[in-house]
Amino acid sequence: MRKPRKTSMSMLPRLALLTVAVGFGWSALFTSIEPTANGLSISISGDVHAQTCFRDPEDDQVDRRVPNMNLSTADKLGEIQEIIDTENNPQAGIEELDRMIARGTRRYNGNELANIYKMLAYAYFILDDMPNTITYNEKILEYCDDVRMGMLSTTMFTLSQLYYSQERYGEALGMIEDWLLIASDPGPNPYYFVATIYYQQDDFDRAIEYVELAIDMATERGMLPIKKSWWGMLRFLYYEKENFPKVIEILEIMVKEYPERSSWVQLAGMYGEEGFEKKQLYAMESANVLGFFDRESDYLQYQGILMNADAAIRGAWYLQEGFDKEIVEESYRSLNALGQSYQASLEDDEAIEQFEKATEFTEDGRIFKRLAQLYLGKEQFEKCTERAEEAINRGGIDRVWDLKILQGMCEYNRGRLTRALEIFQDARRDARDAKAESAERSARDWIRYIENERNRLRALEAAEAT
């Protein structure tokens, strides 16, 4: 098994984009008093076991002889623990412990002093005083050779977490690496903790290495399924490294192990980014069938995917379902999307209905241009003219000359040739200024056609007059 190498990296803490929770449990990190063959002793509850003192990693003696605790000292610590826990008065406990130290440290052996400091650290932790909690845990390490390995190991592990909580990531990393040197079969969790420290230091390569190590260890030990937060961390890290194939690979695992809305929707998004349109469609379809569509963005994203897959009418049906369930609210974006699906499906009446609703939510002329086009196709030329004029007045239109050509066509079909001619002439000037040659030719052809039509009508009138 690989051991983490020592590092002296120290960087400014970053604001995490990802919430990293390391649940090792604080209740198992402090002292309790229990009887032993030699009287009373302070021991550590919890499942962290050290192999040897971190100052002497070659020594494989697990149960080293430590100085016995004097009975009076043990009794006093027991009384103080009662004050802290039973009476719920950690401040009074601290005062008693301070008085013990004030009497002189020479009266205590290393084991006794370490346990006094441990109880001080515990009391300060209850008071949420992290600086003093750290200080007194650090003091315990000064008596490495005089305490049981469980106490030493747990103190080191606790300190690493405390440093982490205070954004002292370099110290947290150094301490957990020292702890790993003495830990007997630590399991995968501490390696994931190392990964979170590297993450906080922006060293994503090393963070990836340790998350994958933790996952491999957990897999080998049959600790399945792998924790969702571990896969989430690895996915995030690979995304930051822009290794999108690995992101997809991880998401494909997550939708099997933890079939949740976020994983399916993210997988669909990644398929889309990588050009796997069919897989993107299947992923969103799966999310919908599994009942994970619970927000507006799900329906709008699915509608867009179905539009790209030439299944526009299905996009309209599902988006309408979102409206019916009151998950999708009426807005310019949602109504425009629904109208586009109907328009692409050649359901012009339904498209017009949605686009007309969307006009209540817009300030520019784009939706009015779309309506003018539909009304022209429906041969509702007066409405076509009205919507084209509204679009021009509101602005925000790209290639406005095309809109004017559309408006001119509507006016021509209403028999208003003079007005149509004026509009086409205006469109030709705009197109010429923009060097839009195709539009300019189209406007010119309409102008010639209308002028010829006017001449034909005049000649007809003159012939009838004679």
Image: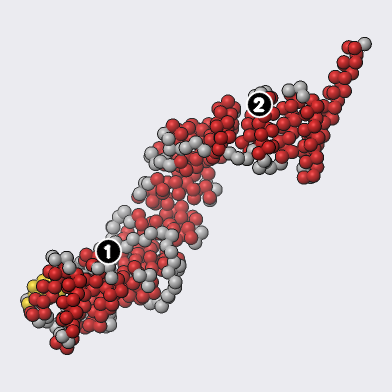
Q: Which residue is painted at 41% across and 34% down in the image?
A: 325
Find residue 222 and report its image quarter: bottom left
Which residue position holds label 1? 24
* Front in this rendered view, residue 429 or 141: 429
x and y percentages locating residue 67 in the rendered image: 14, 83
x and y percentages locating residue 442 in the rendered image: 78, 34
Q: Look at the image and tell me whether residue 179 can be seen.
A: no
Query: Could you tell which of marks 2 and 1 lies nearer the N-terminus?
Result: 1
Find residue 63 and report its image quarter: bottom left
Q: Which residue is painted at 82% across and 31% down in the image?
A: 447
Q: Which residue is painted at 30% across and 74% down in the image?
A: 131
Q: Residue furthest bottom?
A: 106
**Numbered badge on residue 343:** none
* Front in this rendered view, residue 160 or 75: 75
In front of the other: label 2 or label 1? 2
SS category of the residue bearing label 1:
loop
Quarter of the rendering occupied by the C terminus: top right
Relative to residue 402, is residue 260 drawn left or right? left
x and y percentages locating residue 148 in the rendered image: 18, 77
**Above-or-below relation of 422 to 232:** above
**Above-or-below relation of 56 to 172:** below
Quarter of the rendering occupied by the N terminus: bottom left
SS category of the residue bearing label 2:
helix
**Numbered badge on residue 383:** 2
**Circle 2: residue type:** Lys
Q: Look at the image and tell me whether residue 427 can be seen.
A: yes
Structural crowding at the residue carrying mark 1, measured as other residues with C-alpha within 10 Å and reported as few (<14), some (14–19) or many (≥20): some
Structural crowding at the residue carrying mark 2, measured as other residues with C-alpha within 10 Å and reported as few (<14), some (14–19) or many (≥20): some
**Circle 1: residue type:** Phe
* Front in this rendered view, residue 354 or 224: 354
* Front in this rendered view, residue 114 or 302: 114
Relative to residue 455, is residue 185 drawn left or right? left
